[in-house]
Image: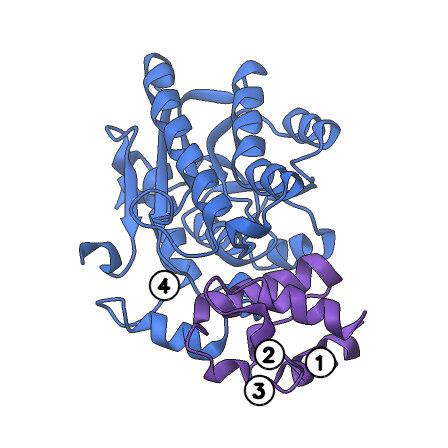
Amino acid sequence: MHAFSLEGKTILITGASSGIGRAMAVSCAEAGAVLIISGRNSDRLTETLHLLQGEGHSICKADLTKEDELAALVDFVPKLDGFVSNAGVVNPLMLQFVDKQDVEHVLSVNAVSAIHLTRLLLQEKKLKKDASVVFTSSINGNRCAYIGSTLYAASKAMLTGFMKAAALELAPKGIRVNSIEPGMIETELLKDGNISQEELDKDKQKYPLKRYGKPEEVAWAAVFLLSDATRWMTGSSLVLDGGYTLQ
Amino acid sequence: MEMNEFIKNFGDQFDDTDLSTFTPETRFRDLEEWSSLVALAVLNMVGKKYAIKLLPDEMKPTQTIQELYDLVLSKK
């Protein structure tokens, strides 16, 4: 169906070197978009690029917490029909061990850099009229919380607040701003061993659908929000959590 | 890295268990106050005080403070 297609749209995806961001790039390309993918690791970005259908896609390596690299990314991209902000870190740390650097790092990577990138794209007029902006947020910090995630939760709630006010402010330009709030997703971030396999297996049972989400399941939601099918949707958060927050 | 200091840092993660309870032979998993929350605090303590990233699955086989100490030492 045409409304769900991304044919003819140029879209920037950050955090595209792995996990949810990579899956989003693959799904957006399948839906017909031309992509600019960004991330910190060139090799892994190139791997993502090789997975993309269609032609005309490009890579722009950038650490979004660095001002000059952020500016170079904004300079690199053409006028966009869509932008998905997806870069993020998870660092399970109890509040009693949090120091100033931890606060700055997590908020910077997960929220502040996304805010700066959005404002720069706007200020440099890189967002077309009727563009769609999508933030990958989380149920954590917005609908629920987890032990050891004070900073992550704070960063994701920050994104939601920003998304809502930006949606209101950009509506006269026809630019839509929405977010996705996934529950736990099977990605490398989970596989790095910070949470034991036993804990993960136990946690999955708390989900009514009895499993974690898959990166492509978040990607399909991003395609939906980037497409014309949601052209009357702005300031919304799409919860994708296998029913977790129903309980 | 020194055992007495490690024991103090370990014991600091408990609120109700007296510091004098802890010795290298203490089987910490048998303590009433031991929980997944304290376990996470211990992992964080090792990360912050000794700059070592210890994973939950690595810590799982350890039973005594001595075993945990040896594990941390082996990763230094």
Q: CA distance from mark 1 to mark 3?
A: 11 Å
Place of residue A175 in the rendered image (x, y in percent of width and height, measured from the top left)? 38, 22
Quarter placement of the C terminus of chain B: bottom right
Q: CA distance from mark 4 to mark 2?
A: 27 Å
Place of residue A222 in the rendered image (x, y in percent of width and height, measured from the top left)? 38, 45
* Crowd tier of the residue under label 4, counting other residues whose Cα lies within 10 Å: few below 14, some 14–19, many 20 or above: many
Color used for chain A? blue
Name the residue at 53% across, 80% down: B28
Disc number for residue B63 = 3
- To the question of a shared chain for discs 1 and 4, the answer is no
Color used for chain B? purple
Q: CA distance from mark 1 to mark 4?
A: 34 Å
Could you say whether the residue bearing mark 2 is in a helix, strand or loop?
Answer: helix
Name the residue at 43% across, 45% down: A153
* Crowd tier of the residue under label 3, counting other residues whose Cα lies within 10 Å: few below 14, some 14–19, many 20 or above: some
Circle 1: residue type: Leu
Disc number for residue A213 = 4
Which residue is outermost to the left? Answer: A247
Circle 3: residue type: Gln
Circle 4: residue type: Gly
Q: CA distance from mark 4 to mark 3?
A: 34 Å
Mark 3 vs mark 2: in front: 3
